[in-house]
Image (cartoon, rainbow, N blue to C red):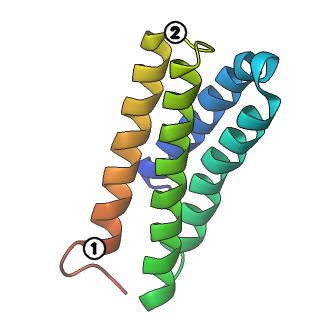
């Protein structure tokens, strides 16, 4: 069984990687960092969802922090004029939902450990 959050993360990774092609024309370093951050969301979430106890929480926290990094990277790319406001808003919204879901999975009462 695959959790919906993993499907959403993979979708966001694909979309952000596409956006990074535009960013890379202006700022290759920002594009690389943004790609690493969004990929890290998926890798850490996948590891965390398969872990137990404290490791689960730590990996999900890492995934959330990488999501926040990716959100800020998108906002920076928008502020620099590399991306249009609609693209930034759409991707930030998707990542915000992912981070919120990861938070619930990490900290909800009665979660399986």
| In this view, 52 is above or below 105 | below
26 relative position to 13: left or right: right
Q: Residue at 33% of width from left, 82% of height from top?
A: 112
The residue singled out by tag 2 in the image is: 84
Instruction: Kindly report which numbered mark, 2 or 1, lies closer to the viewer in this rendering.
Output: 2
Name the residue located 42 percent from the left edge and 48 percent from the top edge.
Answer: 4
The mark tally for this picture is 2
Where does the image place residue 22, in percent across and percent down from the top left? Answer: 72, 16
Check disc 2: other Cα within 10 Å, few if <14, some if 14-19, many if 20+.
few
Q: Is residue 58 above or below residue 27?
A: below
Mark number displayed over residue 107: 1
Q: Is residue 4 above or below residue 106?
A: above
The answer, for residue 1, to whether it is visible in the render is: no
Which quadrant, please, contains the C terminus? bottom left
Pick the residue in front: 26 or 67.
26
Q: Tag 1's secondary structure?
A: helix
Among the 4 quarters of the image, the one containing residue 24: top right
């Amino acid at each position: 069984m695959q959790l919906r959050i993993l499907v959403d993360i993979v979708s966001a990774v694909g979309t952000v990687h596409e956006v990074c092609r535009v960013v890379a024309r202006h700022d290759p370093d920002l594009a690389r960092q943004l790609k690493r951050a969004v990929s890290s969301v998926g890798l850490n979430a996948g590891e965390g969802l398969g872990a137990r106890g404290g490791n689960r929480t730590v990996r999900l926290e890492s995934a959330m922090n990488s999501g926040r990094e990716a959100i800020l990277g998108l906002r920076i790319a928008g502020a620099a004029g590399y991306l249009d406001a609609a693209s930034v808003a759409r991707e930030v919204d998707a990542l915000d939902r992912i981070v919120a879901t990861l938070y619930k999975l990490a900290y909800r009462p009665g979660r399986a450990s």
